Image (spheres, rainbow, N blue to C red):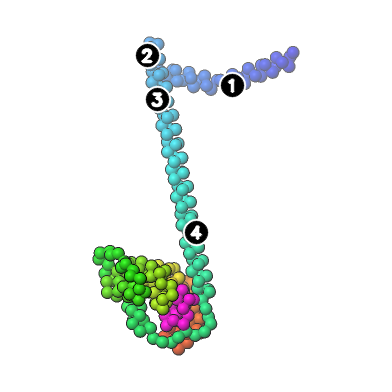
Amino acid sequence: MISNFRLHLLSLSLLVGVAAPWAANAQASISSVGSGSVEDRVTTLERISNAQAQLLQQLQQQMSDNQSDIDSLRGQIQQNSYQLNQVIERQKQIYQQIDSLSSGSNGAQASGGADAAAGAAAGNADAGSGASAPAAAPAQTGDANTDYNAAVALILEKKQYDQAITALQAWVKKYPDSTYQPNANYWLGQLHYNKGKKDDAAYYFATVVKNYPKSPKASEALFKVGVIMQEKNDTAKAKAVYQQVIKQFPNTESAKQAQKRLSGM
């Protein structure tokens, strides 16, 4: 009996403790209404209630907007992560391509003729100059030699380097058995290098060495891979490539240049 009374008394005390702050706040809100008739006080209380309801609605809207911003940022982060992974995967492919370069027999020592001179001209050209009005790449005729010459003309005559890249990439896919394949890939490497896209340039140069090791372009392409690795501050990889140039293509101008580079490193 006494225990039940004490329990009831304790419950009542807790109830009073919880209700006291609320009652105080309510009293403060009512007291802030001011004096006047009952109708005026009711009107004032309604205004306060409406203002609080409007504030609550604004807060809810702000929370909803913040959540939308968070969701948008999450999507952007996911997209950036995907693009970063693509870049990393591309880097891996490039290095795998370089690592798999053949270090076997020596390449042919014949001169590259007009294409070699054209390659030097592309190396000295500024990829951003001369492209006054963008023009579409020439339509392919179905003849490998004709289409190749048309693509090269975009570089040497029209200075339309972006269109030349597009034309050469299409040509490489369409004529995989053409004897101009090493030249076309070398052009693509040089054009991308001029544009500052060194990873893509290394990929095309490495393609020349790997797929066409006996081409007159192979020694120079391999040397260009070493230059790119050196410019990317990958000293170990650059040295290895220069040494491979000297070993695989001795007595060539590329081997001489590679030896100079090694001596200065």
Instruction: From the image, tell me which residue sits under label 1.
Output: 17
Marks 3 and 2 sit apart, C-alpha to C-alpha, by 16 Å
Marks 1 and 4 sit apart, C-alpha to C-alpha, by 59 Å
Q: Earlier in the sequence, mark 1 or mark 4?
A: 1
Closer to us: mark 2 or mark 1?
Answer: 2
In the rendered structure, which segment of residues is drawn in magenta? 205-224
- Crowdedness of circle 1 by 10 Å Cα count: few (<14), some, many (20+)? few
- Crowdedness of circle 3 by 10 Å Cα count: few (<14), some, many (20+)? few
Closer to us: mark 3 or mark 2?
Answer: 3
Q: In the image, what residue type sits under mark 2?
A: Asp
Q: In the image, what residue type sits under mark 1?
A: Gly
For the residues labelled 1 and 3, say whether their Cβ atoms are less than 8 Å apart.
Answer: no
Residue occupying the point 48% across, 19% down: 26
Q: Is residue 55 above or below residue 67?
A: above
Instruction: From the image, tell me which residue sits under label 3.
Output: 51
- Crowdedness of circle 4 by 10 Å Cα count: few (<14), some, many (20+)? few
Instruction: Estimate the x, y position of residue 182 in percent, counting from the top left.
Output: 42, 77
Residue occupying the point 38% across, 18% down: 44
Q: In the image, what residue type sits under mark 3?
A: Ala
Instruction: From the image, tell me which residue sits under label 4.
Output: 85
Q: Which mark is residue 1?
A: none
Q: Secondary structure at mark 3?
A: helix
For the residues labelled 3 and 4, say whether their Cβ atoms are less than 8 Å apart.
Answer: no
Marks 3 and 4 sit apart, C-alpha to C-alpha, by 51 Å
- Quarter where residue 136 is shown: bottom left
Quadrant for the N terminus in the image: top right
Q: Secondary structure at mark 2?
A: helix
- Quarter where residue 181 is shown: bottom left
Q: Is residue 162 above or below residue 80?
A: below
